[in-house]
Amino acid sequence: MALISREKLTTLIKEIKQGDISPVYLVFGDRYLCRQAADTLCQVLLADGGTIHPVDGEQEDPAATLLNLRSFSLLPGRQIYRVSDTRLFHSKKVADALWKKVLRARENNKEDLAARHLRAMLVAAGLDPSDLELDLAGLPATRWQQAFGFPKPAAPLDWLEPLREKAASLPSPTSGGDPVDMFEKILQEGLPKNNILLLLAEEVDRRKKLFRLLQDRFAVIDCSVESGSSSRAQKAQKSVLQELVKKTLGEFGKTMPAPVTDRLIERVGFHPVAVVMESEKLALYVGDRQRITHEDLDAVVGRTRQEALFELTDAVGKKNLDRALLVAGRIQENGIHPLAIIATLRNYARTLLLFRSLQLQERYDYRPTMSADQFKSQCLPLLKENGSWATELKGHPYALFMQFRTAASFSPATLCCWPRLILDAELRLKGSPVSARTVIVHLLLSMLSREA
């Protein structure tokens, strides 16, 4: 059976209803889309009765799962063993994606989640998380590349050791032997008629023998969506979100014009769960009305003034001119006064200029390559000794660390020019016939083009 795209899931469902049922289904890709597809499969497969047996792939004992799969159940109907977050298809090819999840979880202060992702990364690379001699921070760059398949990060990794210890303490499979080999053997032998294995995975290595076996003999559904900011990736992501909005609103008997849908997607971003939730909120908000308007969107999903202005400064800090122009236009459409934008940019420029000047003073010992922990323990105490900057340095240590990193990405000459540009824009808003939108666009172009 060939690889099945998410768009062809309807065809697969029709085949299942006609009696063409596979004993094994693998669904991989975007987490929400995988769960949505798996829910649909379970609903159809259990139309005549049966039971779902959920299994957490992160704490799964493969031997126990295989024992259940090979056993004849006394329960009536089909028995679906649904394994979420299976690790069967991990290898060092997916280590890079797992490493990014480690960093993202750590940045969000989710240490337990970061430890789980780190454990998965180590196991995928064939390393033992409980190995006391495994010094990840001291691992040579060549060995790191060989083990994980991507270059070793340049930033300090001293924080990895306590995270590795946490990862080592997590529950691990109790069975012996290679679980991949065990699954391959059992699947080759066949399963009892009413037993079905449903595997869900975000990351898979398509080169693995087990993946090829499932693709050739069973059913594999690809729910992945191209990531990145390329035009092709953006188009693919938008198409998925448009489909989710249409489907969700259709269940409520509601419709939404294309421009309103585009605005919703622009506000939420590529977060399928959030898009579905916001669509449901809109459907409930309009009550008996069938058509959802721009006004409804602004009332329910409209960003707060603080969120919108933060998004603008975030785009400026990342030197994303296209995004900054788009956000500036949107927030003016949402009623935020141009002078509020000017005030926000002025405060932001002042903060970055201050932090950049502090970086140039050796006594504060700031280094662009330092980690968040090093910044908090070494640099921040020295900065706070100077009471002149108490207000600017009263935020969360990690937020300050990120602001210092943003400031370091700009040259002092660029940041020194920003206050004059912002003042000129303010004077134009107050004393010239030029439209506010044109003034803001000109300001952003002037600020970011100097960093080209």
Image: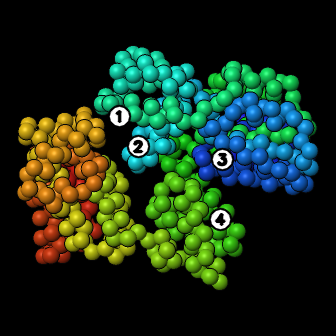
Check the image and tell me how it is coloured.
rainbow
Query: Which residue: 27% across, 75% down?
Result: 337
Q: In the rendering, which numbered label is found on residue 451?
A: none
Q: Earlier in the sequence, mark 1 or mark 4?
A: 1
Q: Who is closer to the viewer here, 254 or 278?
A: 278
Q: Earlier in the sequence, mark 2 or mark 1?
A: 2
Q: In the rendering, which numbered label is found on residue 248?
A: 4
Residue labelled with disc 2: 106
Distance of label 3 from label 1 (alpha carbons): 33 Å
Query: Mark 2 is on which residue type?
Result: Arg
Q: Who is closer to the viewer here, 398 or 450?
A: 398
| Viewer-nearest of discs 2 and 1 | 1
Q: In the rendering, which numbered label is found on residue 159?
A: 1
Is there CB contact under 8 Å for labels 4 and 3?
A: no
Distance of label 3 from label 2 (alpha carbons): 24 Å
Q: Looking at the figure, which quarter contains the C terminus?
A: top left
| Viewer-nearest of discs 3 and 1 | 1
Please tell me how crowded label 3 is: few (under 14), some (14-19), or many (20+) other residues with Cα within 10 Å: many
| Viewer-nearest of discs 4 and 3 | 3
Query: Mark 3 is on which residue type?
Result: Cys
